[in-house]
Amino acid sequence: MGCTTTDRNNKRYPEILLETFFHEAPFVPLTIEDCNYDLICTFGKWETSRDIGGPLYALYCGTRVPECLYGVASYFGRNPIQGDAKHCNGGSFFARLSVHLDWIRETIENNTRDS
């Protein structure tokens, strides 16, 4: 997923889309706080805000084949809910699509009705 730099110092970006793998965590990484129901908390992180809005796919078991779109990249590195700009927990956080499914369907319907 994403547009992550391949050279942090020179801000070089790859010419092809890169993938990385995340593992879902039931809690905010490096804390004992439960992950909010509308978020997918993961171990692993990406290095640039250019990836915000990127897809998170669930894979078929034992494969690298996407099963479904599971989440959308939201923020990383620190949890803005905690309000401490210096707090960095190293996790990546994705919006959980199933929570927003009614809104997604309604938006698609409203924008395709007149087409």
Image (cartoon, rainbow, N blue to C red):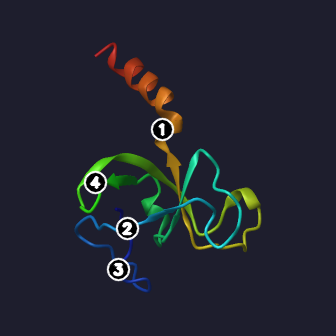
Q: What's the distance in space between the residues labelled 4 and 1, CA to CA?
A: 18 Å
**Which residue is at a point 36% across and 53% down the rendered structure image?**
58
Q: Circle 2 — which element?
A: loop
Image mark for residue 80 = none
Q: Which residue is mark 4?
A: 60
Q: Dot 4, how many residues are within 10 Å of its Cα: few (below 14), some (14-19), or many (20+)? A: few
- Decide which of 47, 104 is in the foreground and name it: 104
Q: Dot 1, how many residues are within 10 Å of its Cα: few (below 14), some (14-19), or many (20+)? A: few
Tag 3: residue type? Answer: Thr
Q: Earlier in the sequence, mark 3 or mark 1?
A: 3
Q: Earlier in the sequence, mark 2 or mark 3?
A: 3
| Residue 13 relative to residue 92: left or right | left
Tell me where residue 115 appears, x and y as whole percent: 28, 16
Image mark for residue 98 = 1
| Residue 27 relative to residue 55: left or right | right
Image mark for residue 6 = 3
Q: What's the distance in space between the residues labelled 4 and 2, CA to CA?
A: 13 Å
Does residue 57 sit above or below 112 in this rendering? below
Tell me where residue 105 appears, x and y as whole percent: 42, 25
**Residue farthest toward the bottom in the current orientation of the protein:** 9
Q: Circle 1 — which element?
A: helix
Q: Which residue is mark 2?
A: 21
Tell me where residue 11 appears, x and y as whole percent: 40, 78
Q: Are marks 3 and 4 in contact (CB under 8 Å)?
A: no
Q: Earlier in the sequence, mark 3 or mark 4?
A: 3
Q: Dot 3, how many residues are within 10 Å of its Cα: few (below 14), some (14-19), or many (20+)? A: few
